[in-house]
Structure formats: C-alpha cells, structure tokens
Image: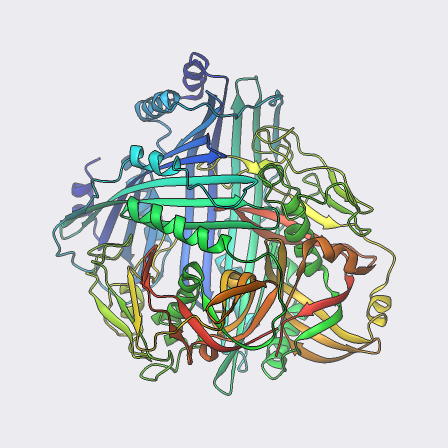
Amino acid sequence: MNIEKFINHVPDPAQIRIIEGREMKYEYEDGYLSNVNSKYTKTYYIRVIHDGKLGSAYCYSEDQIKDMYEKACKNGVPFSGRDFPEVKERGKSYLEKNISYETLRELCEIDFEWPKKVLSERRIGKYYESSLSFLDNHGTEFFSDGNYVYLNTEIALEDRVISYENASLNPNYLVEDISNNINEMLEVPKTPIKVSGKQDVVLFIRETANFLDLVLNGLHGDYIEEKNTWSWDKFGKKVFSDITVVEDPNAKLIERTIIDDDGVKVKKKMLIKDGTFLTPVYDYFTAKKYDKESTGNGFFVPDDSHGIDFTNIIVDGKEKYDLENCIVAYDIMGYHTCDENSGKITLGISLGALVKRGEMKGLVRDLNIVGSIEDLIKNAAITKEKKMFFRYHTPELVLRGVKVA
Amino acid sequence: MDIDNVVAYLDKLPIDYWDVFYERKKIFEVYLMNGSLKDVQGVDKSGVGIRIISNGVEKYFSTEAINDGNIIKEEIERLVRVDGNGKAKIENSSKEKGRYTIKPDFPEEPLSEIKELCHKFSSEKINNVEIAYESMILEREFINSNGAHIFQSIPRNRVAYFLSVIEYGKVTRYYDAIGELNKFIIDGLDDETIEERKKLVQKLAKARHPKAGTYDVVIDESLTGVLAHEAYGHSFESDLIERKQSALSDSFDEKIGNISIVDDPTEKCFGHFKYDDEGMRGRKRFLIKDGMFLEKIENLRFGRGGSGRRESYEDLPIPRMSNTYFLPGDYSDEELIGEVKDGYFLLDSIGGQVMRSFQFTCQYSYRIKNGEIKELCRGTTFTGDVRKAAEMIDGVGKERIMRAGRCEKDEQTIPVGIGGPKLLLRKIQLGGV
C-alpha cells in the first residue's frame, strides 16, 4: 500500500505516525554474559477526526492501515478540532556516532573493582534507536531519528542490595556516573541509627528525578482544567521555593526532539520561575478542548489517543545547600502509591545515610515521610552540583524541615 | 514465516535449545472523566518471541513482523553469532501438548455500561469521577525443541475508579481497582457498594491523619495480599535468590513466625493459568508452611519451572507469582479487633514495595481503642523488616478473600491475584502526622 496516497485520499483529516525502533539488551551476571535480547518494531499509528471525534488505532504492517483507519473512525472521543497541526519542520537526525552495540557491550564488561566484597553483580545495558516519520493530509513528511544507551548495575551485599541506572547520549559519562554513585552508596555505614522529628532530606539524584516527575505532573493542563490535581489553583503563585525549571527539547539529554507526537513544535520554555508556577502545558487535543494553544507537550504511547509529557528538563535555583547535617535518601519506596491528584505523599526511605558535620554517621532505613507535595516543596533547596539523569539535568533536591517517623 | 518454517529453521541451528512464543492480544480500553469520554482504544496486536540457548547464553528476539521471514532469520543468525561463555541452560523443558481456553463472558465494547457506572458514582458532592476500564484476551501459543506445543487463551477485565472531593481547596481522592477473569467486572459492583464508596470519600475529606508511631494494627485482606505478595512472594523468586537479592536470602533455614503462604495458578483468580509461559503445567506451591520455607517460585532458567511468566512476546519469561495468599486461621474479625488496645484498623491497599524492608500504603483507617472501632482516619503507610514482620503476626482471620492485582518486575507488568484473611500485627511502625 502506498501510505502517502492513502492518507491523501481519505475524506477526513488524518495523521499517520510511523515509529521504527530497535532495542538491544545485554545482561551480565557476575561477569558472564547471561542473556541477549533483541527487539525490532515498526508501528503505524493512525489518528483521524471523524464525525466530531478523535479516533486512533495502530498496527504493525502497511497492509493493515486501511482496517485501522476504519477502526479509528468507529471509536473516538469528542473533539471540536477540525484538523491536525500542520507539521512544518524539516527532518533532523540526532544519531550519536559514538553509540553502537559494540560500545554497549564494552560498557557492560567494565570491571568497576568495587571496594567492598559483593555477593553478586548484575549488569544490564541497553541500546535504543528509533526513527519517526509523520504523514498527514497536507502531505507533510517529517523525519527524525535518535539513539542512546542505558546502563543498570545491581550489586548484592550481605545486608543490602544497591542498584543504580541511567541513560545518556554519552557512554563515557555513564561509566563515571555509575561508578561515582554506587561507590557513594557503598559508603553508607552498616549500623542503623534511629531518627525522628524534623530533618533536612537530600534526595539522591534518582529520587530527585522521581520527585520532580511528581511535581511536573502538576503542570498537566488536562487535570488542571478539571481541577483534579493539587496544583489546579497554584499558577502565578510561588510554590516551589526559589527553584527554576526549564523544558529544553534541544538539550543533549535522551528526550531530544523537535516536534511532539501531535506534530507541534516543542519550544524551550520556562515552566517554573523562581518557584512560581508559570503556565500549564497542553497537548493539541486538550488545548483544543479548553480553547488554549498547544505547548508542544503531546507525548503518548500507542495505546492512547493523546497525552501530555515533557522532553528534557533543566533545573536550577538560588539557594545552594551545604550537606552538613541532613539525611541523604538513596532509595525511596512508595512513589507509585502517591496520590498525584490530591498531592498526598507517603514515602519510605529504605536506604539512607545520616550526615553530621559533613560525614556519614549511620544507616537510616524504614523512615516514613508523610505530607503533601505542596508542603514539601515550599521550602526546598538544591545542592551545588548538577547531574545528568535520564531526561534531567539537575542538582539534587533538598526537602528541608521534613517531619520523619 | 509460518510456524512450520520457523520450527524447521530453528531445528537446523547449532544451538542447545529453542522455543517460540506467539501471542495475540485483544484489548479494549476506555477512560471516562465526569461522564465524558477521554479515551477509547481497541487493539488487536500480535507478535512473536524466539528464544535460543547457545554458548551458555540465553538469546531472544521479538518482533511484530511475524510474516517477515528475512528479518527473523537475520536477527536469529546474528544472535547465534554473539559469543560468550555463559552459564545459562534449560533442562527438563516442557513436553506438554494441550489446549486451554476460557471463554470471555463480558461484552466486547461495553461503553454504555461504563457510562452508566460513571453516572452512578456521580453526585453533587463528588467533584470528579474517573473510570478506567480494560478488557484483555491473551491468546498464546508455545512450541519448543523438546516437542511441547501449547495453546492457551485467558480473558481478563478490570475496572479502576477514582472519586475526588474538594474541601477547603484541597483534593481528597479515593481509588479502587477490581478485576475478574471471564465474568463481567461491572456486574460485580452493586449499588450498595457504590453508595458506600461515595459516602466514604466525602467523610475522608474531613477526616484526620493517623498519628505516627508504633501500634498494634489489624490489616484487611487487600493489605494481607500485598504483604503475602510483596514481602514474601518476591523473596521466594528463584532468580532473586540466585542473585542473593532476596530479602530472605539468609533466612531460608530458619522458621519465619508461624505463617503459611501459598502460590496457586490453578485457582481461578486474576493470576490464573494452566500452563506457564514456558509451556510448563502450573501447580499449587506452599512457599512457607507453618513458618518453614518449602518451595521457590521458579522458571526453567532458574529451576524446575512452572512459574515462568512474561508480560508479552517482547519479554523473556522470569520467575513470577500467580495467585499468592496467606492461609486462613481461627480468628473472627471481632476477635482480631478485640485484641487491640491502642491501634488502627488499616484498609484498602494502594500498593507497596519491598527491598529488605517493606512499605505499604492504605487508603483509610479506623482508630481502635480498647478493642473497639472508633473514628475514621485517612490513610497511612506502614513499614517494617521483612524478616521480622512474620513474628509480628499475632492473629490470623478465618475468611480468605482474593483481589485482582498487577505486579511489576524487571519492567514487566503481569496480572496477579493477591489475598488472604485479615491479620493482627503487633508493634508496627506507622507513618502519619
């Protein structure tokens, strides 16, 4: 089937997004190659505006596109828009030449020579490569491709399991990052210390990213318009201490792109300035529904017809925290039970270190933090050093004066 | 590339073992908010995963391009060439031949029923009602180099509902998710339960938080199920034991309290299967009996198999639970509550997580004073050490109830059943204010 011809002859506004991807995974156990997992996928994702509804479907071969188009016409959600965004940008390649299956395997085989005796070590490396094409009734075709690597190391000690993962466009950065962070966690003393009352809690980079995900979900336009989120009345108000958060789709992090999944150009924008929530973000569908402009934040998986997410996030702030007396939380449980709509949080620190006068004094574990996102961020600070973690370039967040039990 | 060609091709390769996993997934999903349709999708998705063992390495390729023999051959040949002296092997693989089908008894696209449910939950005092419904029919075919050939088709449907109330500018939300195999789940939500939930979320909006501290608590069946699954079940998975990552790694020779926990895929709950995803017949296992460790949860790579499950054809099978529960005991609900002088009754799990410690969260609770239930409180978190938790169990209820759940491990999410009776636990650390 000639897809371009097909899409230009259907009576309704329609859009096809083609995502072709390869994923290669190597898993090592105690230095031995344990498994290799290779995936290839090519998805044709169709959206159509038919009879006042936005419908979607997807398939894996060109032969099925006509059937999927008819399916998308049949089921849909009410939509007042009359067309899809016109994709105006030309194609751009983001392929990093220093990333390949060979470099991935080299990363997985590095001996970090941990300073402590480990009972087992598991290393997982993944290589991702994908390309994106858009076709719509305007005949537009946009092409973009990109790749990155991911590395995860888990080590079992006598009294704990330590793991750390990251993804980057720079394999050398990953090696240094994994080594530094796991070595830091290995220094956490064995002896537990009881802690309670109000404490400053420094969120290790992984936990900073998890926490920022929670905060940024409060900027989703769909929930804000429905008043179904803790942040619905916070815009224009200072909520997040002196922190500034910028979305930058061009930053050299793994979510680099020019356009979102709707075909709207993603622009660099300030989301939070000196703690003030500036504006909600919208995908094309939600923006049309509430008579707003899309902010280029339409990102969603094939199982959804639309959705909101972010590209790369850069965080900075004015108040830099000295790690003198605090708890550093390396492992936190419970994010998936946090209520993002009410903003209520119950988190448990399963691996932490009590720091006194800049030195780790004891192990902290089984410590609960109960509160709300709003209360936890109003007094937040940041550490001095910025780190790259998946789509984030950020210092570590410090939640000050948190009641722990 | 049809199945006979795949088999013929794989049989010629210089490898120790192969298996082929075909899957067809028919999914229908609906998401409504306040009566208006936010998303609806019907998906019919197929793919294949091919596993080979050579040079002691487990190698896997998956794709939806089932009919593209060239892509499949190219990838498999490349994988065969991957060098490495690993230790992976599969012994005693399945030779089973069989067909097992459960016919779905739910409508294919129940839009009107879901809209009606949304309408029933709505009221002036509830600011937001969200309903997410999903049905899935999983058809799977498994063939291996040992002559196994299995076909299995299992339907499931699940509904999650979220009720929100805004009081003094703050959002309070209540959430529940229930699931069934082939029965239509929405039929199981009667009007009485719906009204009860609507009243509950309104009361919760005005309720206080529990006070943080150490208490005796009674937990309901949903929390018991999470305890069985998260704190104990995962600790018995053979890959985690092999890697010394199990929370009970150094406790398998010791008595763990007086508890008994079972994993049983034959029971027709949400985690049910007849054959696992490596073609092995599923069977009931006693993980712990009267405090003593008995059996692991194993796939073929890390044991004798029977519990090798995968989310989809894109994934290798790993040791996973099915329906995991505490065995019931002797206490009535009143007797359990009566044992608590100063504590809480915790209800409605919204999940948990385990490393060496566990952390579980409930949605609401009741204060217990001198053996009597007092005021309604908001939800909270309780934490503890996995090894010590069993010794803290001081009473086990009579009635076992199973709930539908979802378990994520190694980026794979699968349907599971979790449950048990109510439990009384002594001196548990509660989060709170």
- Looking at the picture, does residue A130 appear above or below residue B337? above
Nearer-the-camera pick, A199 or B279: A199
Residue B175 on image: x %, y %: 57, 67
Relative to residue B308, is residue A398 depicted above or below?
below
User: Where does residue A317 sit, x and y in percent of width and height?
Assistant: 31, 74
In this rendering, the count of numbered labels is 0
Q: Position of residue B351 (x, y in %)?
A: 59, 60
The way the protein has been coloured in the rendering is rainbow
Quadrant for the C terminus of chain A, please: bottom right
> Would you say B218 lies left or right of B209 here?
right
Above or below B169: residue B73: above
Residue placed most toward the observer, B298 or A282? B298
Residue B15 location (% of width, % of height): 46, 16
Q: Is residue A93 left or right of residue B125?
A: left
Residue placed most toward the observer, B391 or B350: B391
Which residue is depicted at the point 32% across and 42% down? A128
Q: Nearer the viewer, residue B338 or B143?
A: B338
**Image quadrant in which you'd find residue B200:** bottom right
Of the 4 image quadrants, the one containing the N terminus of chain A is top left
Residue B8 falls in image quadrant: top left
Left or right of residue A108: residue B337: right
Q: Is residue B110 visible?
A: yes
